[in-house]
Image: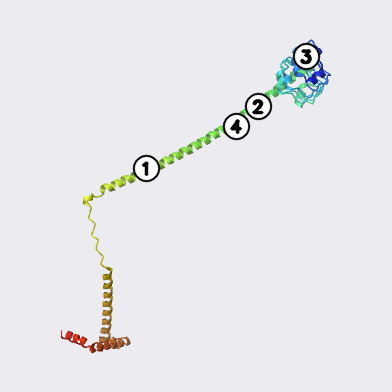
Amino acid sequence: MSRVVGKAGNLRDKLDGNELDLSLSDLSEIPVRDLAALPKATVLDLSCNKLTMLPGEFCSLTHIVRLDLSKNQLLQLPSEFGRLVNLQHLDLLQNRIKALPVTFAQLKSLKWLDLKDNPLNPALAKAAGDCLDEKQCKECAQMVLQYMKVVQAEQEQDLQRKLLEEQALKQKHEAEQRKKEDREREQRRKQKAQQKARKRRDYDAQQAAQQEMKKKKDTEPADNHKIPPKPVQKQKPRQRSKLGVVMRMLLLVFFLLLGSIVACRYTQLQRHSVCTSVNAVYEETVRTLRSCHVLESIVQLASRQ
């Protein structure tokens, strides 16, 4: 800042009444703080310098009524330029400005404007006109302000539309979130209802089982009226049962042999080869028995009887 002031010299020395001439001072920056200390300098000439931008702090110089920024290299004006509410005369001749900030529409005191020799966008250039004389520059200020008000309204509408879209999107998201919460709440409610129904069924089944057991207990006879158990028959010794089986088998074999002998001696089967062998065995057995005296006596005794 000291370098800039050094180039500009002592600002108070350059102040003539309410006019401060800093033109042709080879300025690349604006000494905003020093200018703020001179509220009497309502007319400020910054033409023919090397300015490429205006700092945002420059917009705090609301006491400026007439501003000459012609023949610089300004690319744009700060977004807060509309704060210069007392500005009536603005010269922006021969800069590199393509568009104006939306807040330009707030310069309600602006009566004179020159935008010649700037690469303005077509819509702004059409609104600005030629500005070749005093009347055209006044018309330029009026037409540009109207144009910037339209731009401001369109931007506000775009902003409002974006806000409405964001609000609608937010409401949609909140509605979806509420639906999700409602579904989760309904699911939890159903789960609780199912658990309660299951517990109730288990409880009812338990109560029914207890009542059934109580009913069976009530229908059972008392202990003193119980039917005595039948005496268990003692099993015979297994040895005796085995002996009986053997005796039955021997008797069966004996009757079979006796039947075979009778069949072979007294029926027509006696001529059969099998019966021949049986008869031979029988006769041999009888002869053997007769050879025994004791057996013979038994046989005789038996014959007498």
Q: Amino acid at mark 4?
A: Leu
Give the numbered dot on residue 169.
4
Query: Does residue 41 lie above or below 244 as drawn?
Result: above
Along the polypeptide, which appears first: circle 3 or circle 1?
A: 3
- Of labels 2 and 3, the one closer to you: 3
- Crowd tier of the residue under label 2, counting other residues whose Cα lies within 10 Å: few below 14, some 14–19, many 20 or above: few
Kind of residue sitting beneath label 3: Val
Location of mark 1 (residue): 203
| Pointer 3 or 4: first along the chain | 3
The amino acid pointed to by label 1 is Tyr
Callout 2, which amino acid? Answer: Leu
- Circle nearer the viewer, 3 or 4: 3
Q: Nearer the viewer, residue 31 or 53?
A: 31
Q: Which residue is mark 3?
A: 43
2 or 3: tag closer to the N-terminus: 3
Residue 118 position (above or below residue 261): above
Whichever of callouts 1 and 2 sits on the residue coming sooner in the sequence is 2
Quarter of the rendering containing residue 282 = bottom left
